[in-house]
Structure formats: structure tokens, C-alpha cells
Amino acid sequence: MLRELADGQRRKERDPLTDTSHRQFDAHLPRLANKVTIAGLADARIFARRWVIRDKDPALKALLKRLERAGSAETSASALRELKSALASRGLLPGMDPRA
């Protein structure tokens, strides 16, 4: 989707239905050596359920509720971004420094 700016230039906007930057990524569960590939919303929901069982953090429970209630492409994309952010802040994304 292109959007015309005031100066006549066009800028491409992200469309949640076609944007794949948030789609597939690898993550780790706490105390598990193998990485898990999360390819979409269904995988993210399963991963989050298992994560909540291992780590009884109320913020993770709220994130799981958002993942489970996501009904549109926009809310799904937002919930996946929140999951990636939570993983990154805890150092559970391979190759990411949690202090960065």
C-alpha cells in the first residue's frame, strides 16, 4: 500500500496482512537448550502457554491473553511484536543481547 505524502513523494506503509517481518523467528524457553521456531500466531500461542507454565510471571499471563484474544491481523501482529519484545528483554531470542 502506497501513501502519498504532502511533498508528492510516496512512502510504502506496512500492511499487517502482508507484512512478514514479524512472522517466523526462533526463541528459547527458560531452562531448555533447544531453540523453538515460531512461524505464526498459533505457534506463538503454544509457546506462550508453555512459557507461562515455566515462569509464573503475571506479565506473561497478560501477554498470553492478548495472543489468545487476537482476532484481526493488526492485533495479531501487535501481540507477536510484544512477544518478541518480551523474549528479547529476557535474553531468549538467539543472537540478541538483552542489555542492548
Image (cartoon, rainbow, N blue to C red):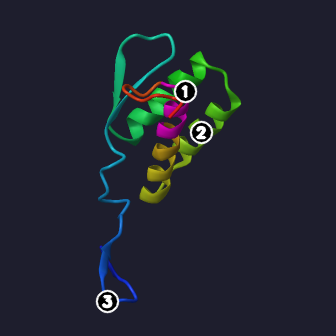
- Name the residue that disc number 2 marks: 63
Q: Residue 4 falls in which quadrant of the image? A: bottom left
81 up-or-down from 34: above or below: below
Q: Which residue is mark 1?
A: 90
> Circle 2 — which element?
helix
Q: Residue furthest front?
A: 100
Which range of residues does the magenta coloring cover? Answer: 84-91
The amino acid type found where label 2 is placed reads: Leu
Which residue is at 44% across, 11% downward? 32
Q: Amino acid at mark 3?
A: Gly
Q: Nearer the viewer, residue 77 or 85?
A: 85
Amino acid carrying mark 1 in the image: Arg
The percent position of residue 75, horizontal first and vertical second, equals 50, 55
Q: Earlier in the sequence, mark 3 or mark 2?
A: 3
Residue behind mark 3: 8
Residue 73 magenta-highlighted: no
